[in-house]
Amino acid sequence: MTKSPEALAAAAAAVKGFLSFAEGRALYAAAMKVGHMAPCLEIGSYCGRSTLYLGAACREHQTLLFSVDHHNGSEEQQPGETYFDPALFDHRRFCVDTFGEFRETLRREGLLETVVPVVCPSAVAARFWQTPLSLVFIDGGHALETVMDDYTRWAGHLIPGGYLMFHDIYPDPADGGQAPLTVYRRALATTAYTAEALVGSLGILRRKRSV
């Protein structure tokens, strides 16, 4: 079931999230380029906007998208913080819980047989991970320690020619936090990657086929 760019944009607009249309299209394009080689993985799905774009491409390739998120919200989504959404707060357990919204996105978009939710912290999911990946999208917690941990745990599973992508890259500190940019630059400094583009706040690196 191939969706036009307009249909993807309309579907994404119905999902809570912070990914722009241009960023989503860049995710989709990257997954379309490499998804035939191995599954894709995202860290931080929130309610599924990025999942929608990546999942649509993975469905085209009849491969899988692993979506890693504990679904209790990142640091900035907690009560009293900038991006807290009271509609996503579970008063029975007194915590943020985005998993219901996420599952509804998968159901509505026909992605239940394409997306594998991995509902736990990224570090737990990575402990015994062995599957090679064609794309790793990092958009979980935005503290420096968290972004660095996601990078060090997952980048090693990326196949040659695969994409490593970071959300919320802001060259100007006035526009946002600097942790994703710091780790993005550290990855680039290893010389294992080439910088392909910066689309909005989406930094796109591609692993070299030989280093």
Image (cartoon, rainbow, N blue to C red):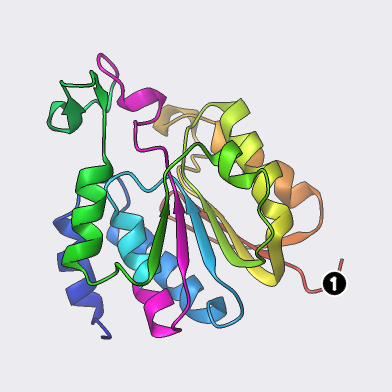
Residue found at x 63% / y 46%: 126
Q: Which of 84 and 202 lies nearest the eye of the viewer?
A: 84
Q: Is residue 132 left or right of residue 39?
A: right
- In this rendering, the answer to whether 74 lies above or below 92 is below
Q: Percent from the top left, x then y, of residue 17?
A: 26, 46
Q: Mark 1 points at which residue?
A: 210
> Which of the 4 image quadrants contains residue 123?
top right
Q: Which amino acid does label 1 sit on?
A: Ser
Figure quadrant of residue 50:
bottom left
Residue 25 visible in this rendered orientation of the protein: no
Q: Does the magenta stretch include residue 160?
A: no
- Picture quarter with the C terminus: bottom right
Q: From the viewer's perspective, is 195 left or right of 26?
A: right
Dot 1, crowdedness within 10 Å: few (<14), some or many (≥20)?
few
Percent x, y for residue 158?
Answer: 68, 62
Residue numbers of the magenta segment: 56-81
